[in-house]
DNA sequence: GGAAAGGGGACCGATCAAGTCCTATTTCCT
DNA sequence: AGGAAATAGGACTTGATCGGTCCCCTTTCC
């Protein structure tokens, strides 16, 4: 289904939120509460993004996260790449040339790379700044609630 | 990981093979043998593609499948679409506007659609004919073997 | 020195893709 | 006419992996 994982989905939501106030530090807990996302998952995602160099982390009390670069210079492709490794649409592309032992015989591999490249370029062309464009007006009331847990009656 | 399913992977390989001889009928079994793909799975995928209108099927002895249109007029996006439903990168996009109950508050939904659109356009721009370009020289020896089953010693 | 934050994993459960199998139904050939 | 060979359309199983939780450590501020 050409589906992105929720990690990437959340990651982009989180990055977008941080991009709205690039100077400010945000704690994982605060972001989770504001965006109504599960706190441990948010924490995990932020750690990965920090490790990937997209976020600056500050430990200790009064710590938190902030963007390490300007929203304009961060692409959606980078966020997804940090969270899920290099963008690879099929297995045989994932590990680069040489991994698939039958590569010289595979009729379409080169063309899969064409597809892969097209998608990557599409994602590289979208910056975080673009993602946040409508954010200004929405973020103050912005919520992205969890699925309603079945309410005990 | 922006991963495509194997169904789509195989589907494109199969369509590419059929595109190499658009006039000719190919049985599911023959395609599976030639491309070294699991026969029941190939059969299943071909059925879906036929139902989706991308393949003509002919029943009975001497039956088989052939492309219903020219390779130039079939896009990769169509193949994936037939096999996996409309291209939707995230859940909240899948069912169109209105499905996500919190949509009016979701800060980034509109921009996810931008991403989705970019990917779809990239896939629509690649035709099956392009996928087969290097096929001519390779298809006669073309094999795409299964993982080796552990050989009984 | 304690509280609050991030760092780094191990771990579990549920979902879903991948593949198999079975039973029609259609069509060709003898 | 009848059997063989092909597609049509499912139900089913299993195995990977995504999503999520939890725990312990380190760092930093007050």
Image (spheres, coloured by chain):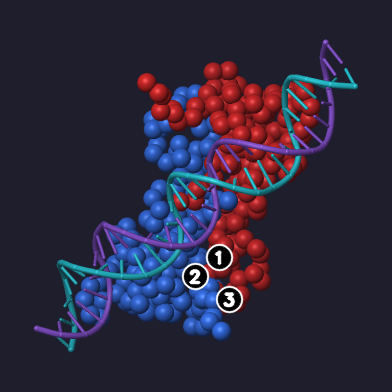
Chain colours: A blue, B red, C purple, D cyan
User: Dot 1 corresponds to which residue?
Assistant: B111
Depicted B4 relative to depicted B18: above or below = below
Assign the C terminus of chain A to one quadrant of the image.
Answer: bottom right
Q: Nearer the viewer, residue A129 or B76?
A: B76
Depicted A30 relative to depicted A129: above or below = below
Q: Nearer the viewer, residue C5 or C11?
A: C11
Query: In the shown orientation, is residue A13 left or right of residue B85?
Result: left
**What residue is shown at x 21% (from left), y 76% (from top)?**
A60
Disc 3 and disc 2: Cα gap in Å? 18 Å
Local SS, label 2: helix
Dot 3: few (<14), some (14–19), or many (≥20) neighbours within 10 Å?
some
User: Dot 2 corresponds to which residue?
Assistant: A132
Disc 1 and disc 3: Cα gap in Å? 15 Å
Could you tell me if the residues under marks 1 and 2 are in contact, i.e. CB atoms within 8 Å? yes
Q: Position of residue B54 (x, y in %)?
A: 73, 39
Could you tell me if the residues under marks 1 and 3 are in contact, i.e. CB atoms within 8 Å? no
């Amino acid at each position: 289904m050409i589906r992105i994982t929720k990690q990437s989905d959340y990651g982009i939501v989180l990055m977008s939120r941080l991009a709205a106030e690039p100077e400010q530090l945000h704690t994982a807990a605060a972001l989770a509460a504001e965006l109504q996302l599960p706190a441990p998952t948010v924490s995990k995602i932020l750690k990965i993004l920090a490790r990937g160099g997209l976020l600056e982390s500050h430990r200790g009390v009064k710590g938190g996260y902030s963007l390490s670069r300007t929203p304009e210079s961060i692409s959606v492709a980078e966020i997804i790449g940090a969270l899920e490794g290099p963008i690879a649409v099929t297995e045989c592309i994932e590990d680069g040339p040489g991994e698939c032992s039958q590569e010289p015989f595979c009729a379409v591999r080169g063309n899969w790379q064409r597809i892969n490249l097209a998608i990557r370029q599409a994602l590289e062309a979208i910056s975080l700044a673009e993602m946040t464009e409508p954010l200004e007006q929405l973020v103050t009331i912005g919520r992205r609630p969890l699925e309603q847990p079945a309410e005990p009656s």
